[in-house]
Amino acid sequence: MGGHSHWATTKRHKASVDAKRGKVFTKIIREITIAARIGGGDPDGNPRLRLAILKAKDANMPSDNLKKAIQRGTGELPGIHYEEFQLEGYGPGGCALLVDLTSDNRNRTVAEIRSIFTKNNGNMAEAGAVSWQFHKKGLLIVDRSKVDEDKLMTVALDAGAEDIKTHDKIYEVITGPHEFESVKKALADAKIESSHAEITFIPENYIALDEKAAEQALKLVDILEDQDDVQKVHANFDIPEEIMEKVAAGG
């Protein structure tokens, strides 16, 4: 089960965002607060909160910050009310971008995101223009050196995984959003360690970008993800490894 690596074209953005520690904490705190507000403050009964807490621990967030974020979500502490929404747009080379946002002022945020698109070789699109190209999925990344392929396939598919993509160094285990937790648990029970696990939006098809468009697209995504209200950017571009390495090295 081969195919394009969704992880390969997103890990650079993740590394870029992770390097900005303060912004990472801000984004995770918002996610924890919203998750607690919607599903309650008990992570055992709230899968979204459970995932957000894992992100917080991976980022070495102080436990006091985490606790207060949950309490703001449940109403035990006063806090800002954040709205969740998505914006859609096109980037360099005609690539499609789906932007996840949380904001306490939708109008301000929309104006800022529109400006970023306009100034970076992109443009905002109407609702529904690109979102149909993406599907909400669970994604788990497993290092190929950690598990035999047959064992991974048996465990993951038996637990309800939709697909397993094999790449040079990793496996991508893809699930439906409702099967994500059961597949994640099945892997853990089988002592198969996943280096990354999330609910995300995966494009139905990818478009190839040349070097110039790739550099511009990566820059646009980095600028978007640096905006405080942006939680994540989903993109449908496919960048060959040699171009990715050249762009990452500064051209």
Image (cartoon, rainbow, N blue to C red):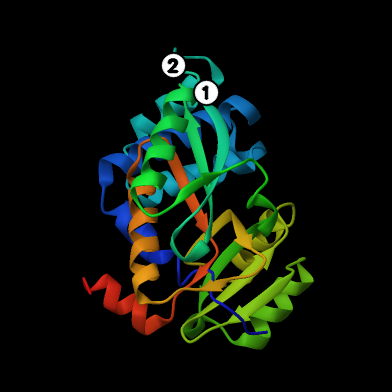
Element at label 2: loop
Indicate the quadrant where residue 50 lies.
Answer: top right
Q: Amino acid at mark 2?
A: Gly
Quadrant for the N terminus in the image: bottom right
Q: Which residue is mark 2?
A: 79
Q: Position of residue 91 (x, y in %)?
A: 46, 57
Q: Is there a contact, CB below 8 Å, between mark 2 and mark 1?
A: yes
| Few, some or many residues within 10 Å of mark 1 (<14, 14–19, 20+) | many
| Residue under the image location 61 percent in, 61 percent down | 202
Q: Which residue is mark 1?
A: 73
242 sits to left or right of 126:
left
Q: Position of residue 61 (x, y in %)?
A: 33, 41
**Mark found first going from the N terminus, 2 or 1:** 1
Please determine whether, in this image, residue 125 is positioned above or below residue 190: above
Toward the viewer: 112 or 38?
112
Residue 126 shows up from this direction: yes
Toward the viewer: 164 or 223?
223
Q: Amino acid at mark 1?
A: Gly
Count every numbered label the image shows and give the total. 2
